[in-house]
Image (cartoon, rainbow, N blue to C red):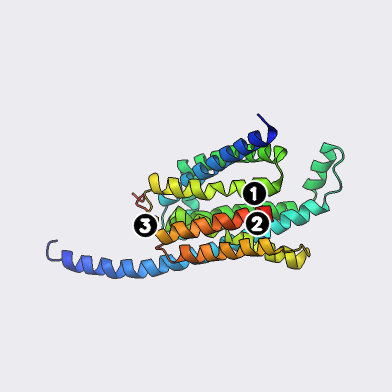
Amino acid sequence: MSPRVLGLSYVVLAMFFEALAQLSFKRGADNTAQNDTVRLLQEVWYQRMILLGIAFFLVEAVFWTMALQLLDVSLAVPAGSLCFVFIALLSRWWLHEQIAPERWIGIGLILVGVVLIGFS
Amino acid sequence: MGVHAPIGCALRMVSDCVSEKHQYRIVWFGLALAVVLDTVTQLCWKAAAAQIPPLDAHLSTVLTLLTMPLLYVTIVLLVLQFLNWMVVLAHADLSYAQPITALSYVTVNAASAVLFQEPLSALRFVGLTMILLGVWFISRTHHHTGGTRP
């Protein structure tokens, strides 16, 4: 496998773990006292899903570092915009969020924007 | 209980309406704060990295890092960012809040152009404009549709 393909595989893995981390954070945050911000911030530290999210985040950091060792930032950053797709799809399937057409358009525009910035 | 049910229901509708508006304010304040914190964190990180002398021995690099106040500022900012993000996620869809944080690409690029005189190419400008447009589209959708709250 060429370093480039290997590097991009690490980016895909890193972004998958980023999505898992964000989904776990969301699940954990949903279990906290929504109407009382002070209590919410105290409860955050006792949520199993949030601790799991932090663990996923650390795994992501390892893969992202491995990716950056093989790839230029100008390739890694646009490839990293994959996380917008992973998060949208998993939010729909796992969290049952309704993604209206306008939200898909917005996510698509942001993705293209990030890719353009990466290659500029 | 049967007699009071309609009153309770009406009261709940009023309070839902108030909390809905309140929720929306919390979400947008949180998102703005998330973008500001992310921007400041990235600029601090960059400024800290620029202060490190060229990489020689690994140990001395780490020791230099540990003596820099900017490192501790960055760590505090990261913790604040995490806590703020939990507040946002408790009130909004992940598929709504997460892509909106891409706004920090716009603020970081603008700040870098001003503070570090980094050039802004035409292609980059088009990319940043598309992010702004994308965030505008997302802001037109309802911020909370998910059903994971128990």
Q: Is residue A80 visible?
A: yes
Within-10-Å neighbours for mark 2: few <14, some 14–19, many 20+: many
Does the residue at mark 1 contact the one at mark 2 (Cβ under 8 Å)? Answer: yes
Q: Between residue B88 and residue A74, name the one nearer to us.
A: A74
- Please state if B7 lies on the left or on the right of B36 as rendered: left
On the same chain, marks 1 and 2? The answer is yes
Within-10-Å neighbours for mark 1: few <14, some 14–19, many 20+: some
Tag count in the figure?
Answer: 3
Within-10-Å neighbours for mark 3: few <14, some 14–19, many 20+: some
Q: CA distance from mark 1 to mark 2?
A: 9 Å
**Chain hosting mark 3:** B
Callout 2: helix, strand or loop?
A: helix
Residue at image x 40%, y 49%?
A92
Q: To which residue does mark 2 refer?
A: A117
Q: Quadrant of residue A18?
A: top right
Q: To which residue does mark 3 refer?
A: B145
Q: Quadrant of residue B36?
A: bottom right
Callout 3: helix, strand or loop?
A: loop
- Inspect the image, locate mark 3, and give the three-letter code of the amino acid beneath it: Thr
Residue at image x 54%, y 47%?
A83
Q: Quadrant of residue B4?
A: bottom left
Q: To which residue does mark 1 refer?
A: A77
Callout 1: helix, strand or loop?
A: helix
